[in-house]
Image (cartoon, grey):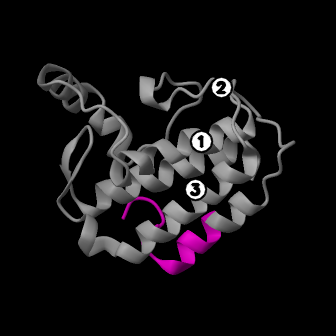
Amino acid sequence: MDFPNLFTQEVSDKIIQRIDRLTPDTLPLWGKMDVAQMLAHCNVTYELIYENIHKKHNILMQLVIRAFVKKRIVGASPYKRNLPTGPAFLIKDTRNFETEKNRLKTYIRKTQQLGETHFNQKASHSFGKLNVNEWNNMFYKHLDHHLTQFGV
């Protein structure tokens, strides 16, 4: 795998430990979101998998996303700072820190427990079927990017 394997207990525990180092007062090193908004933003990735609350893109938008966005999201390169994000991921309202933190930890544990077999060739909301490496890249590098953004 290109990034540490979030499907393993060890790596998912390390990510959760980093999340646990956040406080409601943790400030970002860059960007506009506060810490609760960042956690809510990270939760959207998992909402797209486990919750039926986000509208699917039309076929034209799916083709555009797969052609121009997919590689940046599921590929081996880390995210750069201050990149634009999809509308579903824009969190502008006030969020509860503890609620969002607990939701994210629950989603990470659920994903780890379901494991690689569950995700291999599973269709994603925006990118079609992904292999285990692509799922892991998407999960890990998004979490790592935002936890680094907040200094943990």
Q: Position of residue 110 (x, y in %)?
A: 45, 69
Precedes in sequence: disc 3 or disc 2: 2
Sooner in the amino-acid sequence: mark 1 or mark 2: 1
Is the residue 24 above or below the residue 135 in the image?
A: above
- Pick the front one: 83 or 115: 115
Residue 70 belongs to magenta span:
no
The residue positioned farthest toward the front in the image shown: 53
Q: What residue is pinned by disc 3?
A: 104
* 145 left or right of 151 in image: left
Q: Name the residue under label 1.
A: 40
Q: Which residue lies furthest to the right in this view?
A: 25
15 sits to left or right of 55: right
Residue at 59% in and 62% down: 105
Q: What element carries label 2?
A: loop
Crowding at label 2, few (<14), some or many (≥20) Cα neighbours within 10 Å? few
Please tell me whether mark 1 sits on a helix, a strand or a loop: helix
Residue assigned mark 2: 93
The percent coordinates of residue 127 (x first, y second) are 23, 40
Mark 3 and mark 2 residues within 8 Å of each other at the beta carbon: no
Query: For the point 15% across and 26% down, which residue is it?
Result: 63
Q: Does the magenta stretch include residue 3?
A: yes
Displayed quadrant of residue 33: top right
Q: How many labels does the image show?
A: 3
The residue depicted at 70 percent of the width and 61 percent of the height is: 18
| Between 26 and 93, the one nearer to me in the picture | 93
Which amino acid type is shown beneath numbered disc 2?
Answer: Asp
Q: Relative to the observer, which residue lies in front, 13 or 57? A: 57
Marks 3/2: CA–CA distance:
18 Å
Q: The residue tagged with tag 3: helix, strand or loop?
A: helix
Q: Can residue 75 be seen in this view?
A: no
